[in-house]
Image (cartoon, rainbow, N blue to C red):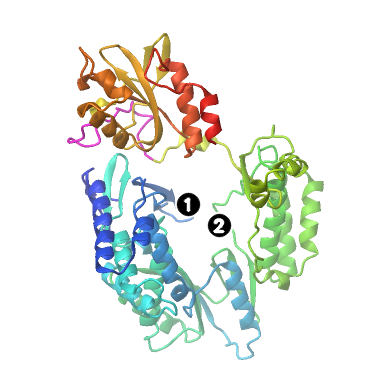
């Protein structure tokens, strides 16, 4: 972070400023008439969070540099980034040098084999752009995006609107790392939805500059920041080509490798043998082949797919049968070390043996999307046969006309994984939790009037009940159940729930008390010997599911636990039976 000119350390209030900047930018676009109110509602999320940076080490490189990734999920610019990415996609995929993935690369190499004019004694070369994402010059990157958007066949969204969104994403990437806030001032974040297509759009303009060199490769292809080519003009001219590539822009530094025999690109080894191109599987020296253990708590379908999927990959990449058989043996050996039986592996790999490589060099055309409701469960070995249960009892669902329309077919079963050790031990906030105890934030900002009212104890006793509290909740916490405590009565008097932020809901309660409205909470705090200063709030539970029924169920649980139902408290509905008919 300190070695790069792409980032600057900023104050913690910079994130709030960036949030306001985004809202203002969207409002300005609405006033100018380049987007409508529906688009505004989509672009400005109701709830959001600050991005978090993490570093993934590049173990295959000598100095083990970190690849900095900012988690863009749930950030204020996520939807802008998603929309802009979609608008740039056609321009990116239509680039002459574009490679979608390894399969696409292999397909293009197969086309070369049919070329009778394949040159003699060529040089294979690969290049890598050093730290492409944070190095993209903003002016040139935006200019490339402008060109891309003007070339769209369908301009459903005005070019000016998309350009404003791209600028907002680039200018408002404020993220947290190690309890500090940073602002990205150059390039684009790895982890942003916009990142890949923004980088590829700029690199297409870079390719066009590279094409101005006096001599060109026989073939030139690029996967984001990794390039592959075949050179036919001798090593001296290749060195000049390399120097020219490094002179296109001072931010963009190129590293090159070349060979007359073989070279690694993506997960393939491309070889030249008697004027013929051969491909083989490439695995990095740091790859320890630590596949899912056979005893691991995963669905059997997942375990079956491991040898089959890896076998398909080997079959697709290896153009020679000898190469396929060699890597097949290695795969079987590595999976045996992970506890899989030889019989099981042979059964799955024999399915791959029967397939033709030519049939694997292509893409499956997906049929129309399956019109089935997904049933998503957290996987555990103790689960019964859910698939058979749902099929068996479909007749119960079909007794309801509404449910019959929704569940025309049995729901499609999908599993999510449960929490693992990584989830428990690693946290995206980098709070130094193993070095010191965290300190709860007292307020989100010096001017906030709500945060000081939130109770900060780790636990408290009330009505002979011990309540554990999360000390880190603030006024911005949303989708939660809260309790209002009266200092004068020394007990909780009311429990409520809200989808909105706690701050918004509590402001309504305070306004009710101030204006003396005829409601249970203001009536209590406006009685003799009580005042608005007696109000304290505890955030009892942040709900896992964002649904009113879920929150209401949790609310009733806490009403019962804290005994705030009438006449001892202020809650009127304290029975689930009162709630149930509403759903």
Q: Is residue 279 above or below residue 508?
A: below
Distance between the alpha carbons at the discs numbered 2 and 1: 9 Å
Q: Nearer the viewer, residue 351 or 169?
A: 169
In the image, 457: left or right of 362? Answer: left
Q: Say which label, 2 or 1, has the lower sequence index.
A: 1
Q: Residues within 10 Å of mark 2 (few under 14, many from 20)?
A: few
Q: Which residues are magenta?
A: 429-450
Q: Is residue 524 above or below residue 252?
A: above
Q: Nearer the viewer, residue 555 or 364?
A: 555
Give the x, y percent position of residue 485: 31, 19
Residue 446 located within the stretch drawn in magenta: yes
Residue 256 visible to the viewer: no
Residue 191 visible to the viewer: yes
Q: What residue is pinned by disc 2?
A: 284
Residue 382, located in which quarter of the rendered image? Answer: top right
Residue placed furthest toward the bottom = 117
Q: Residues within 10 Å of mark 1 (few under 14, many from 20)?
A: some
In the image, 367: left or right of 40? Answer: right
Identify the residue at horizontal 66%, vertical 81% (top origin). 274
Identify the residue at horizontal 75%, vertical 44% (top origin). 391
């Amino acid at each position: 972070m300190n070695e790069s000119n792409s980032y600057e350390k900023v104050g913690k209030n910079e994130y709030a400023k960036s949030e306001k900047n985004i809202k203002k930018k969207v409002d300005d676009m609405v006033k100018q008439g380049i987007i409508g109110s529906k688009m505004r509602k989509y672009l400005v999320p109701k709830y959001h969070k600050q991005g978090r940076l993490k570093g993934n080490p590049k173990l295959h490189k000598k100095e083990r540099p970190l690849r900095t990734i900012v988690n863009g999920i749930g950030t204020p610019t996520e939807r802008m980034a998603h929309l802009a990415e979609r608008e740039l996609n056609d321009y990116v995929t239509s680039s002459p040098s574009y490679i979608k993935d390894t399969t696409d690369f292999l397909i293009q190499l197969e086309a070369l084999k049919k070329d009778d004019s394949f040159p003699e004694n060529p040089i294979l070369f690969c290049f890598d752009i050093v730290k492409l994402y944070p190095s993209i010059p903003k002016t040139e990157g935006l200019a490339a995006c402008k060109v891309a958007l003007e070339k769209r066949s369908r301009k459903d969204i005005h070019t000016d609107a998309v350009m404003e969104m791209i600028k907002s994403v680039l200018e408002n990437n404020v993220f947290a790392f190690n309890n500090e806030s940073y602002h990205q001032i150059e390039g684009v974040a790895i982890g942003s939805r916009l990142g890949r297509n923004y980088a590829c759009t700029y690199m297409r303009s870079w390719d066009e500059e590279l094409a101005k060199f006096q001599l060109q490769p026989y073939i030139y292809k690029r996967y984001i920041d990794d390039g592959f080519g075949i050179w036919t003009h001798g090593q001296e001219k290749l060195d000049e080509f390399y120097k020219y590539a490094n002179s296109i822009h001072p931010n963009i530094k190129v590293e090159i490798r070349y060979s007359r025999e073989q070279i690694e690109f993506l997960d393939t080894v491309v070889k030249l043998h008697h004027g013929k191109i051969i491909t083989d599987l490439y695995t990095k020296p740091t790859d320890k082949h630590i596949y899912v253990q056979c005893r691991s708590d995963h669905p059997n379908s997942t375990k079956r797919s491991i040898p089959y999927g890896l076998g398909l990959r080997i079959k697709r990449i290896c153009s020679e049968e000898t190469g396929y058989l060699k890597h097949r043996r290695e795969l079987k050996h590595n999976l045996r070390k992970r506890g899989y039986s030889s019989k099981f592996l042979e059964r799955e790999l024999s399915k791959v043996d029967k397939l033709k490589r030519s049939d694997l060099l292509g893409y499956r055309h997906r049929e129309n999307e399956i019109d089935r409701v997904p049933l998503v469960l957290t996987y555990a070995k103790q689960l019964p046969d859910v698939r058979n249960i749902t099929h068996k009892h479909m007749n119960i669902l079909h007794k309801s006309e509404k449910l019959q329309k929704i569940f025309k077919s049995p729901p499609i079963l999908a599993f999510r994984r449960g929490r693992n050790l990584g989830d428990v031990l690693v946290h995206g906030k980098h709070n130094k939790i193993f070095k010191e105890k965290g300190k709860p934030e007292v307020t989100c900002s010096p001017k906030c009037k709500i945060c000081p009212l939130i109770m900060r104890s780790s636990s408290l006793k009330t009505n002979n009940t011990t309540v554990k509290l999360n000390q880190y909740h603030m006024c911005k916490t949303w989708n939660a159940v809260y309790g209002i405590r009266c200092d004068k009565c020394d007990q909780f008097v009311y429990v409520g729930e809200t989808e909105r932020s706690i701050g918004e809901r509590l402001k309504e309660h305070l306004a009710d008390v101030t204006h003396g409205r005829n409601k249970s909470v203001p009536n209590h705090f406006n009685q003799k010997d009580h005042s608005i200063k007696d109000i304290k709030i505890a955030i009892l539970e942040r709900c896992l599911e964002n649904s009113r029924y879920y929150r209401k169920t949790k609310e009733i649980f806490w009403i019962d636990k804290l005994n705030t139902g009438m006449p001892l408290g202020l809650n009127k509905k304290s029975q689930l039976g009162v709630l149930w008919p509403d759903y």
